[in-house]
Image (cartoon, helix red, strand yellow):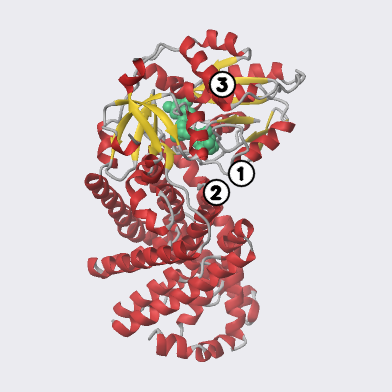
Amino acid sequence: MNLLAAFPGKRYVVLKIKDPEVRRQADCLGMGEGEDVYCVARKDNGPVILGRGGQMVAVGGEIARGIQIAPWRARKK
Amino acid sequence: MLAGNPNVGKSVVFTNLTKRYAEVSNYPGTTVEVSRGFWQGNPVADTPGIYGLNAANDEERLTEALLGDADVIVNVVDATRLRRDLFLTLQLIGRGAPMVVVVNMMDEVRRQGQQLDLARLESLLGVPVIPAAAAYGEGMEELAQVLGGLRHKKKSGCRRLEDGESLRFRANEIYGKIAASGGGPGLSSLDKWLTRPFSGLLTAALVLAMIWWLIGGLVANQVVDITEGIVFNRWLLPPIVRLLLRLLPEGLLQQILIGDFGILTMALAYGIGLLLPLVFSFYLLLSLLEDSGYLPRLAVLLDNTFRPLGLNGKAVIPLILGFGCVTMAVISTRMLSTRRERIILAFLLGLAVPCSAQTGVIAMMLVPMGLGWLSLYALILLSIFLAAGVILNKTVPGQSAGLFLELPRLRLPRPRNILRKSWAKSMAFLKDALPLFAVGAALITLLNYGGGLIALENGLAPLTVSWLKLPPQVVGAFIMGMIRRDFGAAGLMALNLAAPQRFVALVTMTLFVPCIASVLVAVKEHGLLIGIAIWLSSLAVALLTGGLLAAVL
Ligand SMILES: Nc1nc2c(ncn2[C@@H]2O[C@H](COP(=O)(O)OP(=O)(O)OP(=O)(O)O)[C@@H](O)[C@H]2O)c(=O)[nH]1
Ligand SMILES: [Mg+2]
């Protein structure tokens, strides 16, 4: 699933970020591939607000579409 | 030199060390140019915030270049976002220069009741770590002590940089060792309110209305009545004019100083008596928006609205700054990630965003005309802004980036910073504007003296009288407007125009050519061609819109 399908309040793990520039930035922020994040708020076509620790990042619609996530629990298996 | 992630308080630390004010606001990307100062005779540089050292954008390349020469690196980090910041910290340590880590915002960590083991952090990183709350002066003496010791240390060799992933891995590992893990707070209810479409727009509209009401109603009437009406026109000017009338022979010099367009009687009276109070109060209100952290929320709210203009929500930050000073806003467009967005926004700023001084005068003339005219004005400007944006999106080549913006925490603005910032910006306004006003006033007096003004008024009559349906005397105001639009707007005020004409003149002046300083900045950032294009297109759109309005109203 991509980020636009995330539910506010739920935790997810970031699987893949398509845009290389966004991937690099997300990694610097500690919200890159492999990290777990939670969806703080979302509008239907974006932006999605992602949280992790005390941090928050707003992600616009197009970028959100290029970010693959999975529900957080899946990683535990 | 100071280095660190955006919005961690580097500029506050800089001001603390050097006693020189560097602009401080609560959004990432406040500092866009290096500021320099001195601490105990040693040069100190405040740099724009960066997320990593990957030479991925201008800021990172700039910091990279400065790092080469730096004797000591002061890495400022945000204690509440340590996990993020450690990534850059590790990269900086890799550069081998003596370094100290300032863990800032400890006050907020304490308030959240979070535990951080900074002694452990120090031993893991191998560089001194200082807990601080720079905004309250905490930790600054300790920093000075450590800096005193580091000054004489030699650089060790550059260690090889690791690639992003393992750096991130190590940063997370270190963070795991020093912090008691916690989920972290989600959006506060205020945050939700601000970013939801309906309540967010409602708040934005209320904020806007408040600003207009305060500036147009309160300051423009009560305060300016005092500063211009009493201080200037009753106390200061009459004795000076009397004195100069006696001292100076009748003629050009007298006209230049105290004539109808005199440097003292017009330029100074406009600049200080009329515009300064407007500008200062405007900056007070803008600073509240900047320091609370409201602007990035507005960016989230407007992201989708901006997309047809080839911009993303982030553009709202320089845009709002443009209502303070268009010139500074053009510089701060650097926070946008692509050149394409920067050019689009530079055009829009030059065309349809009136700066604080101009907005003040316009509010002063429009608010008494009533809500109808005021709404019409807002509607026309907004439509032109959007139309121009859509056209620019179609014509400016390249690709725009999507929104990817960190949201700072909402904070209660600190009054001290609000005052200091507004003061610094108002002084910058005077320094910029007064010389230009003086030159402009002298120029018009000269024209007037030689009969050139009358000739121009007659020569341009087809444009002013037939097309814009305005009295020929507006030529003077528009010449002033070529120098600075606020000056021109003030010139319009002296003409005492009645309702529809006043409206046409105001709209035309708002869209009129951007001030010389902002065009120069646009030329510096994007080249001569873009600068000229901005200037000419503003002129064309202004005259076209004015004429059409004159025909309809
Ligand atoms: N609570 C608290 N807030 C602080 C502290 N230091 C700075 N701030 C606030 O943090 C925000 C950012 O400060 P700046 O100095 O502009 O940050 P910067 O690192 O220069 O940011 P950029 O120039 O955008 O990279 C401002 O709103 C400051 O008032 C602190 O010690 N405690
Ligand atoms: Mg700064």
Where the C terminus of chain B falls, by quadrant? Answer: bottom left
Query: Residue B68, position in %: x, y?
Result: 73, 32
Which mark is first along the chain, 1 or 3? 1
| Residue holding disc 3 | B166
Report the mark closest to the observer, 3 or 1. Answer: 3
Residues at marks 3 and 1 on the same chain: yes
- Secondary element type, mark 2: helix
Measured as percent of width and height from the top left, residue B510 is found at 42, 68
Near mark 2 (Cα within 10 A), the count class, few <14, some 14-19 or many ≥20, is many
Looking at the picture, how far across and down is residue B535, in whole percent? 54, 70
Q: Do the residues labelled 3 and 1 touch (CB within 8 Å)?
A: no
- Residue at coordinates 54% horizontally, 73% vertically from top-left? B536
Q: Above or below — where is B252 with respect to B150? A: below
The dot on residue B58 is 1
First in sequence: mark 2 vs mark 1 = 1
Q: Distance between the residues labelled 3 and 1?
A: 25 Å
The reply, left or right, for residue B11 in relation to residue B502 is right
Question: Is B516 placed above or below B472 here?
Answer: above
Quarter occupied by residue A37: top left
- The numbered disc on residue B148 is none
> Marks 2 and 1: which is nearer the front?
1
Asked whether mark 2 lies closer than 8 Å to ligand 1, one says no
| Secondary element type, mark 3 | helix
The amino acid beneath tag 3 is Ser
Amino acid under label 2?
Arg
- Give the residue displayed 65% in from the left and 39% down from the top: B61
Residue B432 image position (x, y, % from top left): 58, 58
Name the residue beneath numbered marker 2. B334
Residue B250 shows up from this direction: yes
